[in-house]
Amino acid sequence: MSKTYFTEDHEWIRVEGGTATVGITPYAQEQLGDLVFVELPEAGKALAKGETAVVVESVKAASDVYAPADGEVAEVNEALSSDPSLVNTAPMGDGWLWKMTLSDESQLDGLMDEAAYKKSVA
Amino acid sequence: MSAGDTQKHLPLEAMHEEAGARFGAFAGWHMPLTYPTGVMKEHLHTREKAGLFDISHMQLFAVEGAEAAAFLSRACPLDAAGLGEGKSKYTVLLNEEAGIIDDLIVTRLDAERFMVVANAGNAAKDEAHLNAVAEGFDVTVTPLERVFLALQGPEAEGVLIGAGLDLSDLTFMTAAEPRQDWFATRSGYTGEDGFEIALPLGEAQAFAEKILADERAQWIGLAARDSLRLEAGLCLHGQDIDETTDPASAAILWAIPKRLREEGGFIGADALRRIIAEGAKERRVGLKPEGRQPVRSGVPLMNEEGRTVGRVTSGGFGPSAGHPVAMGYVATALTDAGTPLLAEVRGNRVPVHVHPLPFTPHRYRKG
């Protein structure tokens, strides 16, 4: 069983067992436009909630992606190094950004579910 | 500018909305940045077929009078009297220190009539400056209200013919007035063959619709306009050139005839002569980052010892080049192609090297 949460900053975080996968939402990728580079963290990096974890760069601009919760980077999506456009074509699938362990899963309680998020960007 | 109602709006805004444009603020205008196709495809489409840009934010001035040529040769480092009818020239407005107030395209229409195309963000400043210089000359400077469209790319000529406007007689940097109150030049801001066409508001929508009825043409937003001009090595005023840079350091001396640099006669001539004699301390160059990470405007450049030697003024990804592209200013000793530098991006040092401009070859129709 997995559960996906959404942040006001347009990240999604999907919790499955002990780890969480993080990416940006379809709305966010549409706003950013074609991505040309994704600056990924090192595995093992400690993240604090709200801290910049990843920088996604479109043709025109660089944008921060924030950690939705405290934890540690477990794995990054290496496929994005050669094909950053995966974030555009499959933002909630193959275009995921990083996986992390969570220090305190209850930090996610304040986040939106999909229905609430969709309403917020409608 | 944050509040939408303080922004200026394009006369054809409804057409852009209809086309699904995403808008953003630029130089005080509410401008289409991208269309649903996206910046990457819009950029490539322009280089392969024909891209239609709404550049009505730019300001046209009619300069008319018995002393129009003398006036323009005073305001710009330009031999306006020697400019043939129907010929266009890239030039600048300089202040007394040879700082660049704006860059312009000046076209001679006939003996006493010129057309000046200025940047949106500088339009008010340019108008005040031109009017101040115009005192003492028999000349009037009239801002024109027009829709201004650019059609750029290898299919531009054919698309225009299909839309009922045959401009095939024009070559690069020549112009015509094909209809009453219309103005067209074979020039642009993409490095491609193409045209810029100014026309009355009432005729613009029908004309744009005719162009777009041709499947080779589509709307292209400001984001792709920026990546196209950057690959073409063309300056954006306010970013790559401004009143703190001069034509020598900006590497646009080619636009100023050698005789004028020596003889002067234009505003800023003494300062420019001095700068040229002493040698510019820094110069604008192309910059190619290694790898895929773009380096952008404002990023400092260092030499291999870590000393700051320059700055990036424009940077992004070049969809046709297939790699990040940038331009900026570096100390004159470091301007040779291939010179290795480091750009500091968010604490990381990205290797870049000086690269010849343009990144993608110009494909102008020189006749």
Image (spheres, helix red, strand yellow):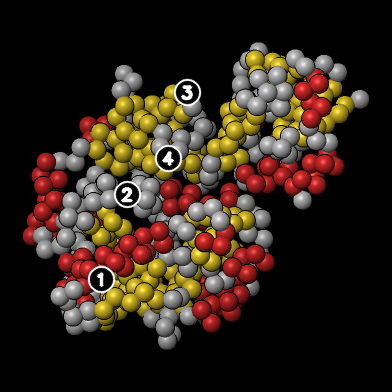
Identify the residue shown where x is 22% and y is 32%: B333
Question: For this view, does A103 lie left or right of residue B32?
Answer: right
Residue highlighted by disc 3: B348
* Label number found at residue B131: 1
Identify the residue shown where x is 38% and y is 47%: B239
Mark 4 vs mark 1, foreground winner is 1
Callout 1, which amino acid?
Asn
Residue highlighted by disc 2: B241
Decide: is A119 above or below B348: below
Image coordinates for residue B18, horizontal then vertical, percent: 67, 66
User: CB under 8 Å between callouts 2 and 4?
Assistant: no
Callout 3, which amino acid?
Asn
Residue highlighted by disc 4: B297
Question: For this view, does B62 lie left or right of residue A86?
Answer: left
Q: CA distance from mark 2 to mark 3?
A: 27 Å
Identify the residue shown where x is 50% and y is 38%: B323
